[in-house]
Amino acid sequence: VYQWSASLEHRLTSYWSASIDYLGSHTIHNQQFVDLNAPALPQGNLANVSLQDPRRFPAWGQWLTWVNWGYSNYNSSTFSVRNREWRGLTLLSSFMWAKNLSSSISPIANDRNNFDYRQWDLWRGKAALTPDRRFVTAFSYRLPFGKGQKYGMSGAWDAVLGGWILSGITEFSTGVPQTVMDLDNSGTGNGNQHANRIAGCDVNNAPRDRFQWFNTTCFAAPAFGT
């Protein structure tokens, strides 16, 4: 894992400050799950042969194993505003933009997708575990009741109402990337395939409800043997 970062912070007032942070990383030799005996696509001279004939070792079936071919590239920037306690309020608010490209689209980043060892990173793209944008605000507010506070109290009143702190965390985030899949039509018996994206079709033209969040007519089954 190679990692690098940079930060810039500026004090706005005696209580408030802002910062911009950048973080990047590059990982190599991630574990990738492949079939080392995957058959070639049924094209050309191999179009009309059995499934076993296009394999490197026709007498054997799948050779499923882990190899350290995978990689990923992560970059993010964060803008934050924070303060020391100001009139009882302490605040930390951050907005982050991030992009994580990986040789695998698996939710655990380095697991399974395309099994063909010849084109093991054919499905490289945005990893299905990193949101593009995230906003988080954490706060605490010391209520102005009790001994030494704006609304001073003593005795039983102070014991019951004094010293309370209200706090919370609020988060807004985009979702993670999702991949549109189709059943295997490759003629190799190696799992699922990517669906074809239809050029010029607006994928966002959908009701965006729980039945259809994106325009499903923008995707089609790939041709056999691809």
Image: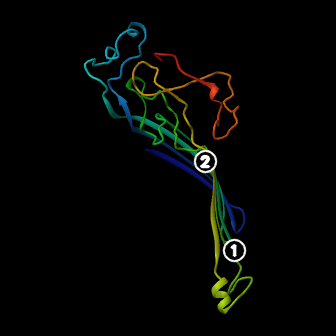
Q: Quadrant of the N terminus?
A: top left
Q: Earlier in the sequence, mark 2 or mark 1?
A: 2
- Real-space Cα separation, disc 2 to disc 1, in angstroms: 30 Å
Left or right: residue 18 versus residue 30 is: right
* Crowd class of label 1 (few under 14; some 14 to 19; many from 20; radius 10 Å): some
For image coordinates 64% across by 81% down, the residue present is 163
Q: Which residue does the numbered mark 2 point to in the structure image?
A: 77
| Residue at 52%, 43% in the rendered image | 129
Amino acid on which the number 1 mark rests in the picture:
Gly
* Extreme residue in the left direction: 59
The answer to whether residue 6 of the structure is visible from this angle is yes
Residue 158 spot, x, y in % from top left: 66, 87
Residue 195 image position (x, y, % from top left): 54, 25
Q: Give the residue furthest to the front.
A: 211
Mark 2: few/some/many CA within 10 Å (<14, 14-19, 20+) = some
Name the residue rendered at 63%, 65% in the picture. Answer: 168
The secondary element bearing badge 1 is classed as loop
* Quadrant of residue 198 within the rendered picture: top right
Given residues 125 and 178, the one toward you in this image is 178
Q: Nearer the viewer, residue 24 or 40?
A: 40
Q: Position of residue 212 (x, y in %)?
A: 64, 35
Residue 19, visible in the rendered structure: no
Mark 2 element type: strand
Residue annotated with mark 1: 88
The image quadrant that residue 162 belongs to is: bottom right
Question: Please, what is the three-letter code of the amino acid marked with disc 2?
Answer: Ser
